[in-house]
Amino acid sequence: MHLLGVKIGMTFSGGFIDYILYGLLNWDRSHALLVIPVGIVYAIVYYFLFDFAIRKFKLKTPGREDEETEIRNSSVAKLPFDVLDAMGGKENIKHLDACITRLRVEVVDKSKVDVAGIKALGASGVLEVGNNMQAIFGPKSDQIKHDMAKIISGEITKPSETTVTEEMSDEPVHVEALGTTDIYAPGVGQIIPLSEVPDQVFAGKMMGDGVGFIPEKGEIVAPFDGTVKTIFPTKHAIGLESESGVEVLIHIGIDTVKLNGEGFESLINVDEKVTQGQPLMKVNLAYLKAHAPSIVTPMIITNLENKELVIEDVQDADPGKLIMTVK
């Protein structure tokens, strides 16, 4: 512009108002009219230059990012078939397992696993450890594993024969606006931040927010008045719902699903009403310490949508100690 004799400030915004005030109003001295044809030439050059660079080097400009995962329109009944396909098919499955939070699959060839496809089917995360895949499907995980095993064995041949139901879907359950819900310690022990739980799924809040609990006595108690919604078959995890609709998962220890119920004695039944402080489970801590990676017990609120979680600054805990409040 300087070479063309244009005397107009272009170093900051080059805005329309500046163009009028400092250019057109003094057009005879500023030669501001030349800005328009020069600007058109610049626009054409910029367009073709950047279009070439973006296409040539595959630059991730807005609208050209890697396609985001979209939830597939897969019926719940068809889910085990779709997950099996995403894992590389039945020939790629070496071992199947699951717990209340995740589907655990050891595969023959990890390169055949469609991780994005698994997430698209509803998994909140996928962890890869060697040839072991962990897909976070929440409470549906065990049913998916059960159905996948039967599909592989030939006992299930069509979606109508699977056991996964709509009632077990992971669609958000919103807590009713019934004031605050106080959550007390599930026993005698120590409270630690969730980030210190030695498990990526819980520490990364893939299942929800909460705290870690290190039990010092072999008894887990109800953290509030409510209802027992789930007891995992291996007894290592309990799902509770408060009277106000807050859902809490107490996962006793890490990788304790592999103990197959050893070291646990359930004191309650599904759909049973419980009161705060009521014993839920007897735990053989010595056995867990000897056979599980950790006795740290994640305590997770699984339906915090549109609610606030306040975590108390406590370390030493007992059944009467308030540790969290959902507002």
Image (cartoon, helix red, strand yellow):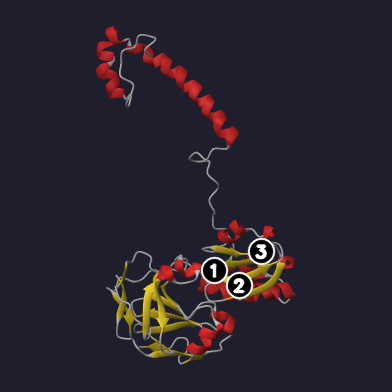
Residue 184 in sight here: no
Q: Is mark 1 on a helix, strand or loop?
A: loop
Closer-to-camera residue (70/129): 129
Compare marks 1 and 2 and give the one earlier in the sequence: 1
Residue topped by disc 3: 87
Which labelled disc corresponds to residue 144? 2
Q: Where is residue 102 in the image (x, y as percent from the top left)?
A: 55, 71
- The amino acid on which the numbered mark 2 sits, given as a three-letter code, is Ile
Earlier-in-chain disc, 1 versus 3 = 3
Where residue 76 appears, x then y in whole percent?
58, 68
Instruction: Label 3: state its secondary structure.
Output: loop
Q: Distance between the residues labelled 1 and 3?
A: 14 Å
Say what amino acid the circle numbered 1 marks: Phe
N-terminal label among 2 and 3? 3
The image's mark for residue 227 is none
Instruction: Give the residue displayed 53% in from the left and 76% down from the top.
Output: 100
Picture disc at residue 137: 1
User: Which picture quadrant has residue 272?
Assistant: bottom left
Q: From where the camera sits, is residue 216 visible?
A: yes
Relative to 137, residue 290 above or below:
below
Q: Residues within 10 Å of mark 2 (few under 14, many from 20)?
A: many
Picture quadrant of residue 35: top left
Classify mark 1: residues with Cα within 10 Å, few (<14), some (14-19) or many (20+).
many
132 lies left or right of 320: right
Q: What residue type is labelled 3?
A: Met
Spot occupied by residue 28 in the image (x, y as percentages of width and height)? 28, 7
Closer to us: 253 or 113: 253
